[in-house]
């Protein structure tokens, strides 16, 4: 069964460093998403991406964040200058249409 | 998207049916009811969705009341592996919009032997 994959599974970085989280969505899907979950808190929407542009973003997704689909398979989330409060699980998701979204296993980001 | 209300936690005996309720009294006509679950620290997993009619798949059944103000997710024979947080989410479907999912606190289902 096709699935969303994410790399790395765990990323440790120093405050102020740039990180890139990678996702490979399900191959025939057209909509892509990033969510995050701070430990013990709710899953929060960050951004959605369709037709090579951002279609919706939350207040969390400020100028420090960017997304890219550099080729036909990868979807990346970049955090330009990480802060301690960026420590969280980051989940990528994809969907074929406007319906159900399929999530990856997540990347645990730890900012020291 | 309409707000949903779910109990914070529930217990269920292994092998019995787990019935998870959700209230969504402000749901509008074009909004669907979606259910996802999250097993400890894993990515949320899609379970089922519906608009008006009851739905069933290999994982669960979804019963939506006639006025659509509430719904129940039924896991017919709960196993220990069904222990998870279950999220009821109401949203419309728009092919030109973001289609973000808004997760609440969900119901923490504990399946006990």
Image (cartoon, coloured by chain):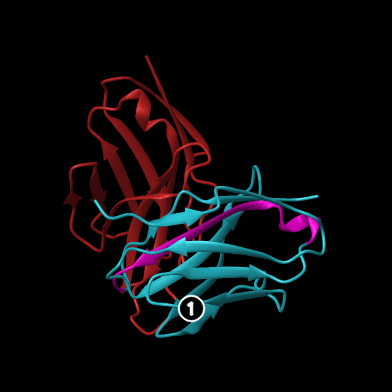
Chain colours: A cyan, B red
- Residue B109: give x, y in percent of width and height: 44, 32
In the rendered structure, the residue with mark 1 lies on which chain?
A
**Residue B48 shows in the view:** yes
Counting from the top left corner in percent of width and height, residue B32 is at 32, 65
**Is A30 above or below relative to B47?**
below
Q: Work out whether residue B21 or residue B103 is closer to the camera in this orientation and state it.
A: B103
Q: Position of residue A36 (x, y in %)?
A: 59, 57
Task: State whether residue B1 appears in this view.
Answer: no
Reading the image, the residue beneath label 1 is A70
SS of the residue under disc 1 = loop
Q: Residue at x 54, y 61 (%)?
A: A35
Q: Is residue A24 left or right of residue A36?
A: left
**Residue B21 is covered by the magenta coloring:** no
Q: Residue at x 66, y 44 (%)?
A: A39
View extreme (top): residue: B113
Foreground of the two, B27 or A63: A63
Residue A90 inside the magenta-drawn segment = yes
Quarter of the image where one finds residue A13: bottom right
Q: How many marks?
A: 1
Left or right: residue A81 versus residue B90 is right
Residue A79: x and y in percent read 68, 68
Instruction: Kindly give the residue lying farthest to the front in the view shown.
Output: A71
Residue interval drawn in magenta = A83-97
Left or right: residue B75 versus residue A78 is left
Q: Residues within 10 Å of mark 1 (few under 14, many from 20)?
A: few
Depth check: A112 or B99 in front? A112
Q: Quadrant of the C terminus of chain B?
A: top left
Which sits in the foreground, B110 or A107? A107
């Amino acid at each position: 069964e096709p699935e969303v994959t994410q790399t790395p599974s765990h990323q440790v970085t120093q405050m102020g460093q740039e990180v890139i989280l990678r996702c490979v969505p399900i191959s025939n899907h057209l909509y892509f998403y990033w969510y995050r979950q701070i430990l013990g808190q709710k899953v929060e929407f960050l951004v959605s991406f369709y037709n090579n542009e951002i279609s919706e973003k939350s207040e969390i997704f400020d100028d420090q964040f960017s997304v890219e689909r550099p080729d036909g398979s990868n979807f990346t989330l970049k955090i330009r200058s990480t802060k301690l409060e960026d420590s969280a699980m980051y989940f990528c998701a994809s969907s074929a249409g406007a319906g159900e979204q399929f999530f990856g296993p997540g990347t645990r980001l730890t900012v020291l | 998207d309409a707000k949903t209300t779910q109990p914070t936690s529930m217990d269920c005996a292994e092998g019995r049916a787990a019935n998870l309720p959700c209230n969504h009294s402000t749901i509008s006509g074009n909004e669907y009811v979606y259910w996802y679950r999250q097993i400890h620290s894993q990515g949320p997993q899609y379970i089922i969705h519906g608009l008006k009619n009851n739905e069933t798949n290999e994982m669960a059944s979804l019963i939506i009341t006639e006025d659509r103000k509430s719904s129940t997710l039924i896991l017919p024979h709960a196993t220990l592996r069904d222990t998870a947080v279950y999220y009821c989410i109401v949203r419309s479907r728009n092919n030109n919009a973001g289609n973000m999912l808004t997760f609440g606190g969900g119901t923490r289902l504990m399946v006990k032997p």
